[in-house]
Amino acid sequence: MRKAIALVSSLLLVATFATPAQSEGAKYSLYQKTLTAFGSSATTLTTQQKAQVAATVEANPYAEKFICTGISYYDQPMSVNITVRKRAKAACEYAKQLNPFLSTWFQNKPTQARSYAGKVLLTVKSVPAEVEEVVVLEGALSVLNDPDKAWTAGQQEVVDAYARAKKVKTAVTYINADDADLEAVAAIDRSLQMGLSLFAPLMEPGRVVVVSYGSNSVEWSNEQMRSLMAGFPSVTSCYGGREFSVVANGEWSYLFHNCAPEGDLNPRSDYSAHAATHLWQGYHGCSCGPITPAWLLEGTATLYGDVLGFGLNDKVNQKIEWGGTPHLRNALRTGDPEKIIPLMETLEGRNARGMAHVYTLGKMILTGLSAAFGHEKIVEFNQSFSKPTDFESEFVKTFGISSDEFYQAMVPVLKSWALTK
């Protein structure tokens, strides 16, 4: 009899878990997972428990609600309720860390089933994905029929292009402020040289100078840059990296203004191959301004910079770093062309500060183009903007299709990447 009562109680426990604000009539599919037992007073997740939360997040890409329930035995004191609630909170916070766009809810519930007591139950409610009409792409775009294959192929094109390139070390002059992080400066040379091996043959020879500075040497860095080029746009704070390709009296200079504050070293933040890509793009820019569209300018640099700087197996190339662009991921996950295509079209103009999704979406667009058409076509399209030209006519000339045809083909690909990357 005791076993029967315990079984009924545990079933009631699961059945009554719910978030306070369910939409009426919503048809959810339910997924549940109980985490392994906690230590007697532990409220933080073990490595094994984190892996279980991660597996649950990965298994439910269409999750609408992610509920974490700390379970206590029905006659335990309030202190136990507080402990299991903290455990539930830790589980949901970790799930949110893995996927910032999850709607999470943590709570605690009593049970008469001792086997559940002290544990955390994950309950995931998902709206089943609608069956969509599948459009089978042909020709060069056929690689996009398999988004995972396209993701790998687009990045592999960069690796293969670098493998074919002649490896010639470029002389680089480093000018460092007293408060620049010299370890960080020394670390950038590797991927800067990789980027230059690929793109320097496509540019006129010239001096390459990197000016690195910290938070207390901003004006010093402005003075250094003004001595190297006319019309340098000064900065008022230590701000990322900026690249300039300038010519004076027939002599080219390729300049990298590099914010590298002392003590701020991040061994994963080697984006100098990104800078080398921009130096090549800047060389092929014209007096009409930088390369447009913005997704081409930053997408090319982000794709090539990430692959050359970090390698295919680094997490920056295994997953998409969505950062501060939740609106972008949410829109892409809908698979709605009316929401997704305008996002690409808004990046057809010049890059503007604050256009956060230009790097993320730009890299995805370039990955698709690279997978479908290859490195040489990416180079050709970038270099077509060395003269005043029309974006659409150059797109058709280079790739043999319209930008709208490509955008349409990318919609399901971007949805898949938003759900799985």
Image: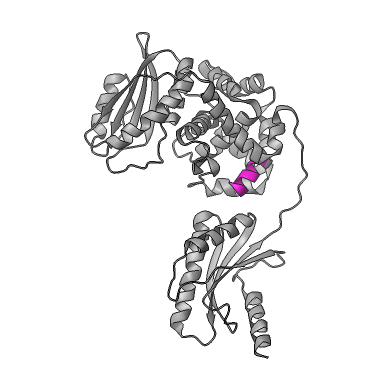
Q: Main secondary structure of the magenta part?
A: helix
Q: Residue at x 42, y 18 (%)?
A: 168
**Residue at the farthest bottom position:** 1
Quadrant the N terminus occupies: bottom right
Across and down, in percent, residue 307 comes to 50, 34
In-front residue for pair 121/247 = 121
Judge whether residue 286 is colored magenta.
no
Percent coordinates x, y for residue 78 in the rendering? 45, 83
Q: Going 28% across and 43% down the picture, which residue do you hit?
A: 263
Where on the picture, by quarter, is residue 200? top left
> From where the camera sits, is residue 315 visible?
yes
Q: Where is residue 215 drawn, in percent x and y?
A: 27, 39
- At a point 32% along the width and 32% down the height, the residue shown is 186
Q: Which colouring convention does the figure follow?
A: one colour
Report how many numbered discs are placed on residues in the image: 0
- Horizontal arrangement in the rendering, residue 95 relative to residue 191 (left or right): right
Q: Provide residue 44's location: percent of width, then percent of height.
A: 44, 67
Q: Looking at the image, can residue 345 be seen?
A: no
Q: Which residues are magenta?
A: 413-421
- 10, above or below 33, in the image: below
Q: Quadrant of residue 10?
A: bottom right
Quarter of the image holding residue 59?
bottom right
Q: Is residue 343 above or below residue 389?
A: below
Residue, far left: 178
- The residue positioned 72% from the left and 64% from the top of the image is 27
